[in-house]
Amino acid sequence: MKKEICLVTGGAGFIGSKLSQSLVDVFDEVIVIDSLHPQIHKNSERPVELDSKVNLMVADICDGDMWDAILEKAKPTVIIHLAAETGTGQSLTEATRHANVNVVGTTQMLDALVRNRAIPRKIILSSSRAVYGEGRWKPLSGQEFYPGQRTQEQLENQEWDFIDSKYLPMNSKINVPMPTSIYGSTKLAQENIISSWCKSFSVDFTVLRFQNVYGPGQSLINSYTGIVSLFVRMAKENKSIPLYEDGNMLRDFIYITDVSNSIMAVLPSEKAINGAVFDIGSGYAATIKEVAYIIAHRYGAPEPHVCGKYRNGDVRHASCDISDTRDFINWTPQISLNEGLGLLCDWIDQKLQ
Ligand SMILES: NC(=O)c1ccc[n+]([C@@H]2O[C@H](COP(=O)([O-])OP(=O)(O)OC[C@H]3O[C@@H](n4cnc5c(N)ncnc54)[C@H](O)[C@@H]3O)[C@@H](O)[C@H]2O)c1
């Protein structure tokens, strides 16, 4: 029987490491290509969360020769493409770096698959809610609309919401993607590239648009991502957590195991999920203020305070409707926000003892 090989790019990161623990039970071999980016990996060491059976190759996905060397020896049946530069705010001033890894890294991989006659059965892409930008809003009366990016003037005047309108949760079946960050644009480019390539080579593919992923294993040294771990560290230091804008921004926080389970759920090559784009969130929209209060309360830290600052490229609200996802794939998020935050805090407490 043909050996089933799963190749995971960026598989030593937060999501990939957790995922590896399930993948090794399903595949004959799991290969991870990861550069162990210093912004995420302290001392560029193999993460303890990465399953010991994983064959880790420390390499850059933008390196075509590296791809040739790997694909000459191993022909993956499934590719899970997670490698990415993920700093939303950072992407505004380091656009080339983000575009290079996220866009050119993806095309380098695809070209190498063709060169080495290593066309897989399936590709799964980890995309992001960032592709939606500000998403759809509904005025008090009238048609839904896409407000687009908030202007500098709006932000300076602290007009956080779009006046007299209500935000509508993101839904891949309805929303037209309209990213407001460079990061979001590169994730949308990844989606489009994977889609056209896979359709041309008759490769199954599924795109998963993750909301805010959190949980044990997330990087504690990357200051550009992971707002929850940042809040935990502040509260542990008995500091009042500063809330950007007015603290009422909505986010959908999805626990890490729910995310890795969603990837496992789309592994089969089924007609219903081939070429589909799914929203992966908890389905619960929390305000940032709510999250800050839960964390501050746990550590007995002073109450969070509104600092009025804002960040270019941040969207006002981001949450999603997961009813379609649940209809199509055998997956349901299991961990509530309170439970998940407790588990993350327990893990951070242990790590930072
Ligand atoms: N964590 C989230 O909240 C979230 C939300 C939406 C989408 N996503 C997407 O999920 C994927 C995984 O995210 P994560 O949270 O695990 O991020 P992460 O930063 O923990 O993991 C990404 C991994 O990619 C590696 N990497 C970066 N550049 C590379 C390169 N040039 N070559 C090889 N490896 C490289 C890093 O070393 C890291 O291990 C990304 O594609 C991201 O866009 C994540």
Image (cartoon, helix red, strand yellow):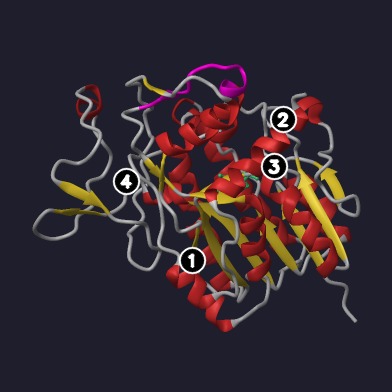
Q: Give the numbered dot on residue 216.
A: 3
Q: Which residue is mark 1?
A: 277
Q: Which residues are magenta?
A: 234-244
Q: Residue at x 75, y 48 (%)?
A: 17
- Name the quadrant of the N terminus: bottom right
| Distance between the alpha carbons at the discs numbered 3 and 2 | 11 Å
| Distance between the alpha carbons at the discs numbered 1 and 4 | 18 Å
| Distance between the alpha carbons at the discs numbered 3 and 4 | 29 Å
Q: Is residue 198 above or below residue 94?
A: below
| Distance between the alpha carbons at the discs numbered 2 and 1 | 36 Å
Counting residues from the N terminus, which is met first, the one under dot 2 or under dot 4?
4
Counting residues from the N terminus, which is met first, the one under dot 3 or under dot 1?
3
State the residue lying farthest toward the left.
141
Q: Amino acid at mark 3?
A: Pro
Q: Residue at x 26, y 44 (%)?
A: 148
- Name the quadrant of the C terminus: top right
Q: Amino acid at mark 1?
A: Val
